[in-house]
Amino acid sequence: MMAGMPPTPSDQPSPAGPAAAVGAATGDAVLHADGVSKQVDGAWLLHPTDLVAGPGECVVVRGPNGTGKTTLLRIVAGLLAPTSGTVTYRGRPVDDRDPATRAALAALVGAPTAYRDLTVTDHLVLVDATWGGDPAGCDARAAATLESLEIGHLATRFPHELSSGQQQLFHLALFLQRPAQVLVLDEPEQRLDPHKRAILTELLSARIESGKTLVIATHDEDLSDALADYVLELTAW
């Protein structure tokens, strides 16, 4: 390599091998990340990592800031192409541009888009209708989702009128409103008080018990202990 030139992926030091796979036996997995990594301008954002998960299972991703948790979730959800490796859902490549991926996977990785002129309920009705909900029941289902998070009193508010914690609950409501077989969440507990974190834990536990697959990054040990079937620890390099 010439002096002064940035290292290429092949020049960069690489870990000895992928992070240990966690999750269901490969034959039982519906979601399978095989050796996924991400490099930008020669810098590692995520070293090669394996992850597998089956129906009714939760894989919790943990590790210090900067170890690639969000990058891994974005790759798993099909929002970011890996530098190497593959992600499949039921044997089909995961890509957010593919309608099959969007129908199967829901991701809350960063704040979702909100519209200034729509109320909280309007947003949930829009999501419900977009994903095929019976129009006659959209309002009732939206109200039920808000009540499940104890934010029914915010139904007629606009997103810009919400506090930071209320914004997070609104984002979770949008996420939970749509149908999906795989749920990917990045630190969903952020800005929530202990009571609301307990409610979130119950709601996510119910999804797991119904056979959904969860992949979640969190720093909350209580949430991790309550939900995790497997834990993937990412480490700094």
Image: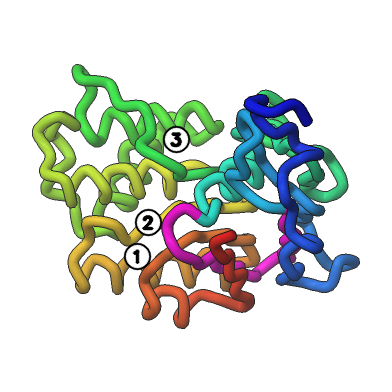
> Which residue: 39% across, 67% down?
219
- Tag 1 and tag 2, C-beta contact below 8 Å: yes
Q: Quadrant of residue 99?
A: top right
- In the image, is residue 94 above or below residue 114? below
Using a 10 Å C-alpha cutoff, classify the residue at mark 1 as few (fewer than 14 neighbours), some (14 to 19) or many (20 or more).
Answer: many
Give the residue number, with chain letter if any, for mark 1: 200
Q: Nearer the viewer, residue 217 or 167?
A: 217
- In magenta segment, residue 2: no
Q: Quadrant of residue 223?
A: bottom left
Position of residue 79 measured from the top left corner of the image (x, y, whole percent): 60, 34
Q: Kindly give the residue lying farthest to the front in the view shown.
A: 3
Using a 10 Å C-alpha cutoff, classify the residue at mark 3 as few (fewer than 14 neighbours), some (14 to 19) or many (20 or more).
Answer: many
Q: Check disc 3 and report its element: helix, strand or loop.
A: helix
Q: Check disc 1 and report its element: helix, strand or loop.
A: helix
Q: Check disc 2 and report its element: helix, strand or loop.
A: loop
Front label number (1 vs 2): 2
Q: How much space separates mark 3 and mark 1, taking CA atoms?
A: 20 Å
- In the image, is residue 109 above or below residue 55? above
Give the residue number, with chain letter if any, for mark 2: 188
> Which residue: 27% across, 58% down?
149
Q: Earlier in the sequence, mark 1 or mark 2?
A: 2
Disc 2 residue type? Pro
Position of residue 131 measured from the top left corner of the image (x, y, whole percent): 54, 32
Give the residue number, with chain letter if any, for mark 3: 128
Task: Specify whether 118 is left or right of 41.
Answer: left
